[in-house]
Amino acid sequence: MRKLILIAIGITTFICSCSQPKSKEIAKVNKADEIVERPNILVILCDDLGYSDVGFNGAKDIKTPALDKLAKDGTIFSSAYVAHPFCGPSRTSLMTGRYSHKIGAQFNLPPNSETIGKGIDLNETFISKVLQDSGYETGVVGKWHLGSTPQYHPNNRGFDDFYGFLGGGHKYFPEEYLTTYEKQKKEGVKVIFEYLVPLEHNGEEVRDTEYLTDALSHEAIRFVKDASKKEKPFFLYLSYNAPHVPLEAKKEDLEKFAAIKDKKRRSYAAMVYAVDRGVSEIEEALKATGQFDNTLIVFLSDNGGKTTQGATNYPLSKGKGSTQEGGYRVPMFFHWPNKVPAGKRFDHPVSALDFYPTFAGLANAKIPEGKKLDGKDIWSDFLTGKNAHKDENIYVLRHREGYTDVGARYNQWKALKVDQKPWQLFNIDEDLSEKNDLSRSHPEILKELVLKTEEWSKTHIQPKWFHDEKTGIEWRQDSMPHFDKTFSLIP
């Protein structure tokens, strides 16, 4: 059993928000005179996991037996997109149901974001709050990256329980990071790098002794077991740090992948395997507590894999940070016994933006009046095999130094703008790798897509922060975003 030492850090806002007594609620609602049991919802989000780095999406050298079994018994989404090719904005969209560009969150929060005191707009109601208000027990385990000061803390954004870290990443071995943390603290370092700080549980520091991925898995199990004792469904957002850098894996996991010669790939594979092991243990906890059959499990990555750090996205082009398919098309499956079709693939495009209204619909939860959403409830279309986004655009946009990359998918067509090159057009159903530019063959289709995307860009606002000071200075000096140049079809 792990040894935990809790140290209060004096954030009374967190304690107050977490210590209020919660009334028990029956996990059933009356809908059209029919008793409908609301599902538990478990979202398992990996960080920088490559499209082809799980067995159910073709991995040969990485073993993911637990994930593969759940995927096989559920439905695999071959065309699942997140709303941004980077961590923070992608997670923002998942929680708010909005494109991050529309609320000024199109850049990652900088490391140690508590120093700038910013986070996701408090006027945006998170899906966690919607579910909490509808009677769900809500929890988040792992990476947050949506604001580190009290008002942006998970406990104040609709989560009853938070265990993890507030920044954009973390080291994995506590015996290493805690030693460095204590040394720097003793030396009087004012701002200690967020990857080194202790984990926390509802505003209290936790000195965990386990490898990070294992610790997060076991805290998810703790939440599942606690939730089973309450007469209401749960929403758990399990936000793994793996396989995000630093590439740090357990010795026994590395030994399982000794055949992989590339050092980065071997460490990366071992880190993915640790996630799979944790998912297996969580599945067992769900079964042991009688909750497995009424739990919707959603598994995906926050963006594409980072190919310079051991990931692969085959057959997609590029990876993390790109508006090509490898940057934001991710591995994903749904699993829910007797509700989600088993042994199926769903090839129509879906977006993580759809989670917000879809989860609210399944929970019979009330979305706040006036709440703007960029996704849609896909559940009925999903069950009947229909394209919920037929004749609708799915966008991605990433700002670079002095210019902007863009992708816009409309049915089988995708318009692409990268590296300040002319706009390109692909039939993405037939050309996943984006190799055959059809812009000259179908100029009117490309023109229409670019015009629609330009209209979408007019809904954006200026960034409220930048991932580093240099980017902010350059943005202002260059009078970004220069959308007039971005959406010009003249080379």
Image (spheres, rainbow, N blue to C red):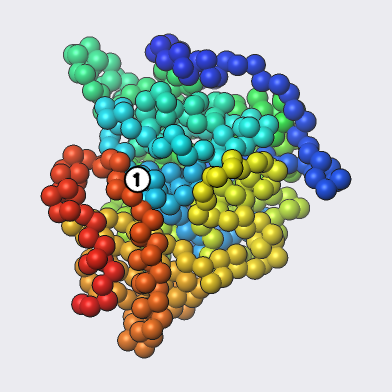
Q: Nearer the viewer, residue 136 or 320?
A: 136
Q: Is residue 327 left or right of residue 405?
A: right
Give the residue furthest to the left: 477
Q: Is residue 45 left or right of residue 84?
A: right
In percent of width and height, residue 457 lies at: 35, 60
The residue labelled by disc 1 is 104
In percent of width and height, residue 230 lies at: 72, 25
- Amino acid at circle 1: Gly
Identify the residue at image location x=54%, y=45%: 371
Q: Is residue 207 above or below residue 254?
A: above
Q: Nearer the viewer, residue 47 or 234?
A: 234
Report the quarter where the N terminus lies: top right
Q: Is residue 364 above or below residue 308?
A: above
Q: Nearer the viewer, residue 125 or 284?
A: 125
Identify the residue at image location x=36%, y=53%: 460
In percent of width and height, residue 440 lies at: 32, 86
Q: Is residue 441 above or below residue 149?
A: below
Instruction: Identify the image quadrant of residue 5.
Output: top left
Identify the residue at image location x=27%, y=30%: 116
Report the quarter where the C terminus lies: bottom left
